[in-house]
Amino acid sequence: METLEENTLNVTLLEPRQKHPTIFVRYDELKEGKNLIILNDHDPKPLYYQLLGERGNAFVWEYLEEGPEWWKVRITKRVKGENDETLGEIAAKDLRKAQIFKKHGMDFCCGGKKTVKQACAEKGLDVTLIEQELQQADKMVTSTRPLPYNEWSLDFLADYILNTHHTYVKKSLPDLRSYSAKVAKVHGEHHPELLPIHQLVEAVNAELTAHMMKEERVLFPYIKEIVASKNNISTVQPSSLGSVQGPINMMEMEHELVGKNMEEIRTLSANYSLPHDACASYSLLYRMLEEFEDDLHTHIHLENNILFPKAIELEKELINA
């Protein structure tokens, strides 16, 4: 066991009825940004939920040790005005954490404006487990450096989205449509879910085709004009858009529609689980759908959580300059 730090409370030395009241007193005495470390002989998770219920989202909970003999938790009182980051904001800063959200089925792109606590409550997930995994992600060492999307200029990011994700969608959709139709025709009698999957693929094709055209012809060029104006390369010309906020709202609504269709495909396919009689085309279809969904998550994340909010802020800066 590690040496006890200065502001540590060994709960095992207290009478059972005095444990939680004593912890609450010590917590309330904390100044903002300071922490209390509690030491216990079992997981104090019930304390987490009591503290959350009675003090609200005003603290950070971090496990330092987790048994088998001792549990050590650091409780830090938040500075007033600091709110929980949303899933989208967390993923924007570190895409490794998006993998944790994906693993637990937490929508960080279309549903990226929820906090971790809100998303966990909706899905019935253990928030302490998710927060612990997010903390551990900070210590992960990866063989390749994640792409610094959040550091790129908006014009570069827009071009990246177009050249990487729009190109991928345009290349993939014809094959997805072809294979979903073929597999539904051959196997649909015994696997009736394949017909609605094919219909959903057709809907995704129609939605994304029109959606990307609007981004490429209208929204992305306007965002690049804003960047050029900021860099004193040119001035923003009067636009029928009025403000960038309007088309962004529309794009986010369309993202949500496509995201729901892909989520329904995943549900119908039981998370892309192949039946015993699946042929090669059946297997290929599910593999392509899963890859397409994975790319779409990153695609929408880059727009909803990085490109769009930064474009809105940049336009405001120019208007107020």
Image: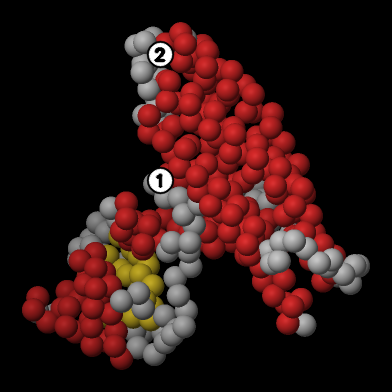
Nearest the camera: 294 or 32?
Answer: 294
Asked if the residues shown at circle 2 and circle 1 are in contact, with their CB atoms under 8 angstroms apart, the answer is no
Indicate the colouring scheme: secondary structure
Any part of residue 122 in sight: yes
Residue tagged 2: 188
The quadrant in which residue 242 appears is: bottom right
Disc 1 element: loop
**Where does residue 152 sit, x and y in percent of width and height?**
74, 59
- Residue drawn at x 42%, y 55% is 133
How many numbered discs sit on the rendered protein? 2
Residue bearing the label numbered 1: 105
Name the residue at the front extreme: 240
* Viewport quadrant of the C terminus: bottom right
Q: Is residue 309 left or right of residue 62?
A: right
Q: Tag 2: residue type? A: Gly
Image quadrant containing the N terminus:
bottom left
Task: Please tell me whether mark 2 or mark 1 is closer to you in this view.
Answer: 2
Secondary element type, mark 2: loop
Three-letter code for the amino acid on which mark 1 is drawn: Gly
3D distance between C-alphas at marks 2 and 1: 28 Å
Q: Is residue 209 above or below residue 25?
A: above
- List x then y, in percent, for residue 51: 25, 75
* Crowd band around label 2 with a 10 angstrom C-alpha radius: few (<14), some (14–19), many (20+): some
Residue 89: percent from left, percent from top: 54, 63
**Front in this rendered view, residue 276 or 96:** 276
- Above or below, 255 against 56 in this view is above
For the point 75% across and 61% down, the residue is 240
In the depicted structure, whether residue 304 falls above or below residue 54: above
